[in-house]
Amino acid sequence: MKAPNFNIAAVERDTGLSKDVLRMWERRYGFPVPSRDNNGERCYPAEQVERLRLIKRLMDQGHRPGKLFAIPHDELSALAPRRPRASEPGHSVDSADLEELLALIKQHDLAGYQQAMQQRLARQGLQRFVQDTVAPLTQQVGDSWEEGRFEVFEEHLYTELTKRLLRQAISTLPGGPRSPRVLLTSVPEEPHVLGLLMVEALFALEGAECIPLGTQMPLLEIGRAAQAHQADIVALSFSVAFPQRQIPGLLEQLRMVLPATTALWAGGSGVLRIPRTTNAELITTLDDAIAALAAWREQHA
């Protein structure tokens, strides 16, 4: 079978590297080394695209591209940092059960995975299901991808199936007057949504009114939405894949466009190692998120 090649637009989408950067690296560093199609357009083999993705991840962690190009691919893979392992305190996790769920995803058994997850939801209830199943399972899926045991499409499959299940569970929660009003979203270039859905489920169980905007909202639009909905809190999620060095500046910029009365919370594995800031409250676990909600209510009672 002929090895696949990707045009420059596809490489830009897949790696997050602009066409100008790809062309500049080609001239400056001699990599990537594209071929040309019948129309004279650049085409990149899959192994070069994989290396570009790895270089981009390492750059996001603070490495300089010039040094990365001189490192063999295997050493680059070893250099790539693993996701920080953050466990939820106070909750027991049956790793054997989680391995069974991972195996169903790895076997591409969609029906089996959905049935197993629905059974756990019915047995545990939504709060324990989020904290004892979805949170640690998401961590394990991420670790498995980092270690090369999961393909990208398998991680995406897990995410889509779990999103569907959480949204169905949230939709069944009772309505009525709720407070505070929490706007949930992420900043541009942060596409991971499971963290937002987990927090939405827990906040809704605690009686908050959740306004989900999905992911990758421009900062000015977040500010406009907070004002339009009279949000008490804007809650952002940052995955460990998001460049940590960008987070403090983004929080500072967003704080400036939010109403003064709207609190700004930032949570997820991505904020584990950033310095504390006056611009936002940093929340690193689901238990901390529930505690922050209780503290907000006490302060505004």
Image (cartoon, rainbow, N blue to C red):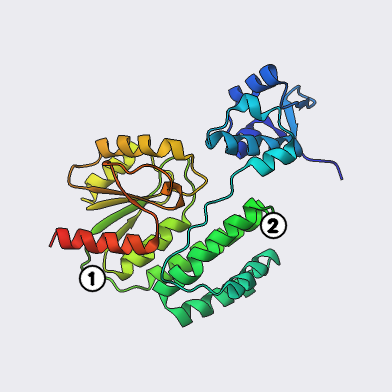
Q: Position of residue 176 (x, y in %)?
A: 23, 70
The image quarter containing residue 22 is top right
Q: Is residue 162 above or below residue 172?
A: above
**What residue does disc 1 label?**
176
Outermost residue to the right? 1
Secondary structure beneath disc 2?
Answer: loop
Q: Position of residue 216 (x, y in %)?
A: 43, 44
Q: In what quadrant of the picture does the C terminus appear? A: bottom left
Q: Is residue 10 visible?
A: no
Secondary structure beneath disc 1?
Answer: loop
Q: In what quadrant of the picture does the N terminus appear? A: top right
Q: Is residue 173 above or below residue 63?
A: below
43 or 150, which lies in front? Answer: 150
Numbered disc in front, either 2 or 1:
2
Outermost residue to the left? 301
Residue drawn where x is 22% and y is 53% of the image: 232
The image quarter containing residue 276 is top left
Q: Position of residue 140 (x, y in %)?
A: 58, 61
Residue drawn where x is 48% and y is 40% of the image: 189
**What residue does disc 2 label?**
149
Amino acid type at circle 2 is: Arg
Please give left or right for residue 150 compared with residue 262 in the image. right
